[in-house]
Image (cartoon, rainbow, N blue to C red):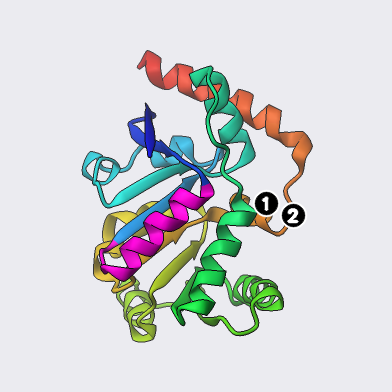
Amino acid sequence: MDQFPCFGFPFSFCSVEELLQFQIEQLEKPAFSTVVFVTADQEKTLVSLDKEIKTNPGYKWFPGDRATNLFFRKKRRLDMPEMDYVAYYNGMFADAVEKERNVCILTETKEELDHVTDQVRKVYPYLAIDGVTLEGSISSDAIVNEINGYAPDILILHVRTGEVVRFLEYDRSRTNATVCVCIGRAAMEEFFGKRRFWATHRRARRLERAYRQYEGE
């Protein structure tokens, strides 16, 4: 995987096939790893993450939406593989069905969980998928215990950025999921085809301004 440092993160760039192969290898070792798709809307918040998390070799950081991909293509001024999120998710779920891997999705509300799982099951009806929500939870310990009770091979985070930060800092190391994938709402909307393409360039420009401010500090 090629890497490019930005916002304090060693962003990785590779083809969908390479990422899926890496993930499959981690699952079969097994070796705990975390894949984080960073969207243009998340950059400024995720910058506050502890440096040890950013540089942990078990964490892989990827552009998480089309706006972030566009930003990096302009920043690097060279050809780079653009992540096809639909192909990635389809490959991940197809492998999970074939290898009978357990998948768990963490969302904020039951309504979101029902929507996401319904969408996934339309395409992969035989996928072993469970869900946990932040809604009504009494503590992070309770959430971690519920996740661990399902013993997932793959844990998918579909929560707002602040919750991703908190999870990565305090809860990821306590979960028993071999692979954790932090998708975020924006990337999931692209997966379901609900992200508006016209906003891509505007969000990429905002990201460029944020980067200039970050570099100027």
Residue at 49% x, 20% y is 76
What crowding class fits label 2: few (fewer than 14 Cα within 10 Å), some (14-19), or many (20 or more)? few
Q: Amino acid at mark 2?
A: Gly
Q: Amino acid at mark 1?
A: Glu
**Residue 64: x and y, percent?**
54, 44
**Viewer-proximal residue among 54 and 163:** 54
Q: Secondary structure at mark 1?
A: helix
Asked where in the image residue 22 lies, by quadrant, the reply is bottom left
**Viewer-proximal residue among 11 and 137:** 11
Main SS class of the magenta portion in the image: helix
- Image check: 50 left or right of 10? left
In the rendered structure, find residue 209 and report the number of the disc placed on it: none
- Image check: 32 left or right of 105? left
Query: What range is drawn magenta here?
Result: 16-32
Q: Are marks 1 and 2 in contact (CB under 8 Å)?
A: yes
Q: Is residue 33 above or below residue 38?
A: below
- Image check: 8 left or right of 82? left
Q: Is residue 179 above or below residue 57?
A: below
Q: Please say whether residue 110 is visible from this viewpoint.
A: yes
**Viewer-proximal residue among 90 and 207:** 90
Residue on which disc 1 sits: 190
**Residue 187: x and y, percent?**
60, 51
Residue at 40% x, 36% y is 11
In the rendered structure, find residue 193 and report the number of the disc placed on it: 2
